Amino acid sequence: MITRADVDALSRLGSDQWPIVSLILRVDKERIDDDYTIRLKNLLRDAADTLDDRFDPPQRKAVLEDLERIREFFRDEGDRFGRGVAVFAASKAGIWQVYELPRDVDSEIVIGFEAHVAPLIKILEQLEPFVTCLISRDNARLFYGRLGNFEELEQIVDVDVPGQHEQGGWSQARYERHVDEHARAHFKRVADELFHIFEEQPFRWLILGGPDEVAAAFLEHLHPYVRERHAGTVRVLMEANINEVHEESCKIIRRWLREEKERAIEILRNEVGGGDQGVAGLEPTLMALQQGQILTLLVDDSYQAPGAVCLNCRSVQREGGTGQQCIFCGGPLQALDNVVPEIVTGAFRQGANLLFMTDPELQDAMRDLGRIGAILRFSLKSQSEA
Ligand SMILES: [Zn+2]
């Protein structure tokens, strides 16, 4: 499965001389009514038909060869994919990269001098890892996964066998103290293991499973780095099957992501209204992008806007058509029906946090903010005063 580091490397992948074919393909084997080979055939045909005069004859020939290579690749190896696939090909530049993707991707093919990574940036939240820990006073089960896939790592049992400690001879108070000590030792052991996992394979969220009072007691044993990742507690039994644990964990993650987006919209609204670290609407967002100011980009996932991109400095511009010059560097512009993917990619390259509003309610909330906006790294006022 593709990782954030892969997407980061792809966002810097380019070739001056040879166009890169970027293919995103949904290969959903669970839907038998939906044959991906037909979708692939249509995409490859459309791509070949629309090779325009952006490319010279040798470049066009190279693209047609890559389209054929992609066709043969899926003919021979397509069976090993079951969800989504991304292929980046510019064989003449030595580029041929294939990645597995989650299921929910829109199929498309784009040809240009950079890899088309905006769709991959959009699915990054599905790739963020989390750990789920089912916890009781003498047992624990640890899982590691993402919204798309999930596995059980280990079980930690610290059963305190009654009778071994001559329970009969103990006072009730002494026995209860003993049980508490035993649970504390167990919590400490599981907490150490979680910190060990965190160091080996950092995760963004921790989800606990178990009774509230047990989860609350266990939380106190966690290393602060791990504890601050606690996103919620699920009510599943220690014996629950892995699918149930995954499903309940995903509910917590989705709620967390939604709340993060709601908070960001609120912050943006305040900063645009009375503060000075927010911009709303296409034009101001483009300006913030050009100045490298974007801390968090918020965008209605269905928003599209025409514009142009500079083939030299990659700046995105509201005005300008193919053949005109970039207002920043004088390089050649290319007109695009939709510049939002360029904005997304540009913000990602600058290390911005990206929030896509896919939920209709959140999209509505973005409407009076121009459907696109940014929380900035530093204040507009301090800049204009400087
Ligand atoms: Zn330029």
Image (spheres, grey):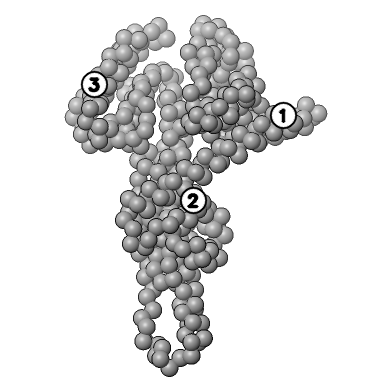
Residue type, mark 2 in image: Trp
Against 260, residue 90 (above or below) is above
State left or right for residue 248 relative to residue 33: right
Q: Quadrant of the C terminus?
A: top right
Q: Which of marks 2 and 3 is nearer the N terminus?
A: 3
* Residue found at x 43% / y 28%: 119
Residue type, mark 3 in image: Ile
- Name the residue at the bottom extreme: 169
Label 3, on which residue?
38
Against 319, residue 149 (above or below) is below
Q: In which quarter of the image is residue 35?
A: top left
Against 315, residue 273 (above or below) is below
Residue 221: x, y in percent? 53, 67
- Secondary structure of the residue carrying tag 2 is strand
Q: Which of marks 1 and 3 is nearer the N terminus?
A: 3
**Disc assigned to residue 205:** 2
Residue 12: x, y in percent? 47, 30
Q: Determine the CA span between mark 2 and mark 3.
A: 39 Å
Q: Determine the CA span between mark 2 and mark 1.
A: 32 Å
- Can you tell which of label 1 and label 3 is closer to the viewer? 1
Q: Quadrant of residue 10?
A: top left
Residue 49: x, y in percent? 31, 9
Would you say the residues marked 1 and 3 are in contact, meaning their CB atoms lie under 8 Å apart? no
**Disc assigned to residue 273:** 1
